[in-house]
Amino acid sequence: MFETSAGLGQLITILIMAAALGMDAFSLGIGIGMKGIRLLHVLKISVLIGFFHILMPLLGIFTGQYVSSLLGQVTTYAAGGLLILLGGHMIFNSLKSGDTRMIDHRSLLGMILFSLSVSVDSFSVGVSLGMFRSNLILTVLAFGICGGAMSVMGLLLGRRVSRNLGDFGEALGGVILLAFGLAFIF
């Protein structure tokens, strides 16, 4: 009974984290979608984001497992601190005003750079999860599917809504990661 409960708790935690990380792809997708985007580019960008949302946490998990073997008992605090920093950074970026130069999302290099930039946060979360020995396949698939799906939603929704929703989405994702970081420490 306890194993089933713990497994369900881990599944819920991973899905919430995947959704929080997908918020970044969602919010930036809205900005790209507002510039006007073809459906073929929506598909290409979303597949690349899904791929990088699998690759980056996978690399992070392996790094986290290595760091965990070095740090021992300190890993819970290190992982929680990392999530707090990442969540705070996402909130700060969403509140920062000013014009940012967008990459040309129609070129292959632009699509790769955009996809990689929204997936970098997944590496840090992967490091934290690697310290806790989370389910590898479940984690990377949840991150990839969520990242790809939320980018599709953001890109398509960006054609119809204002830019303020994108900032709110990134801030919400940051708050969720910040809350998980605090929960790990306390």
Image (cartoon, rainbow, N blue to C red):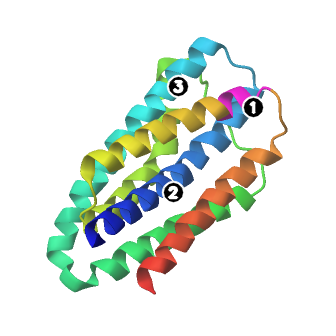
Give residue 16's mark. 2
Find residue 174 and report its horizontal and vertical position in percent.
60, 62
Determine the image quadrant of residue 7.
bottom left
Q: Disc 1 or disc 2, which is closer to the eye?
A: 2
- In the image, residue 99 sits, relative to residue 62, either above or below, namely above
Extreme front residue here?
1
Q: Which residue is mark 3?
A: 45
Q: Disc 1 or 3, which lies upstream in sequence?
A: 3
Find residue 36 and report its horizontal and vertical position in percent.
74, 20
Indicate the amino acid at tag 1. Gly
Indicate the amino acid at tag 2. Ile
Number of other residues with Cα within 10 Å of mark 2, as a class: few under 14, some 14 to 19, many 20 or more = some
- In the image, residue 19 sits, relative to residue 108, either above or below, namely below
- How far, Cα to Cα, is label 1 from label 2? 23 Å
Q: Magenta span: helix, strand or loop, mainly?
A: helix
Extreme left residue here?
69
Indicate the amino acid at tag 3. Ile
Q: Which residue is mark 1?
A: 158
